[in-house]
Image: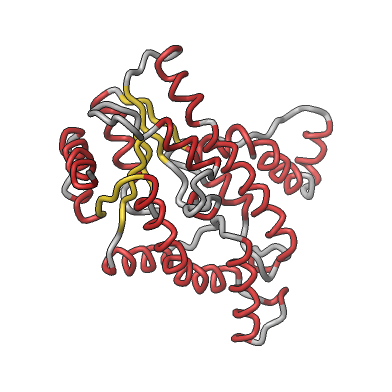
Amino acid sequence: MKNYKRGSPLAVLGMSGVGKTRIASMLRSQDHWFHYSVDYRIGTRYMDEAIEDNFKREAMKTPLLRELLMSDSIYISSNITFDNLEPLSTYLGKPGDPDKGGIPFDEYVRRQRQHREAEISAMLDTPLFVGKAKTIYGYDKFICDTSGSICEVVEPDDPEDPVLTALANSCLIIYIAGDEAHKEALKARFDRAPKPMYYNEEFLRSCWTDYLAETGMPEDKVDPDAFIRWGFARLIDWRAPRYEAIAKKWGVRITANEIENVHTPDDFLTLVDDAVKAQK
């Protein structure tokens, strides 16, 4: 973002778990910043109908719920919040054995493509919400809390990339970079609680092909959690250089170690000020 000054709109990027949402929530609660969560926008604006239809599809398998739905006696909706994105994750699902909660790989790819389009649309809405934050809600300060998969839907080397152009024209882009210790901590956390997420389709297909070859298992017998644990370890290394390219060409870079020492909005904004100065 050209002509940055303290209080200008910000956008934080980085892998899930490096502190994006913690920082955005802190600015919102302690310093009256408007918090635009891209994941929340995806789940409540662009994928809400698909998520709710999936819930209804499952409910229709139960005779009692089917009868109540067909008579309009009940309704089903998701309850996505900034801190609970479980309905979105559940919809994305995991490929593999249906007896272990998996879905067919082709259906998984279809839902991944839906997420890609939704994420692009939600990112392109950022300038709109910068304006709404001020003119409707009375916020002078704005932070965009991006999805961990933003690096999968942009081309950092393209100076006319539509998503990065829209974001950089409205916000200062800040990449929060983890080190090897953070990488291992993310892997350990994911191992404890593997969750569905979005992948670049080329990368995803490569992982799926390699995993099937390595394990010798048919698609419908793959343990869904085992596959996404295996894929997540690769994903961190895949995403790191893409994030670095975004920071180098479109924004600034700070580290997750620095974020860990942030306890107040002023702490964070001082880090940002220093990163901008270092870039000049």
Q: Between residues 187 and 166, which one lies in front from this camera angle?
A: 166
The x and y percentages for residue 41 are 54, 34
Image quadrant in which the C terminus is located: top left
For the rendered model, the colour scheme is secondary structure
Q: Residue at x 42, y 30 (%)?
A: 170
Image quadrant in which the N terminus is located: top left
The x and y percentages for residue 104 are 73, 65
Q: Residue at x 47, y 18 (%)?
A: 132
Q: Residue at x 53, y 55 (%)?
A: 152
> How many numbered discs?
0
Q: Is residue 80 above or below residue 136?
A: below
Q: Is residue 31 above or below residue 194?
A: above
The x and y percentages for residue 135 are 43, 12
Q: Between residues 1 and 45, which one lies in front from this camera angle?
A: 1
The x and y percentages for residue 145 are 40, 39
Q: Between residues 195 and 24, which one lies in front from this camera angle?
A: 24
Q: Between residues 64 and 155, which one lies in front from this camera angle?
A: 155
Q: Residue at x 67, y 52 (%)?
A: 113
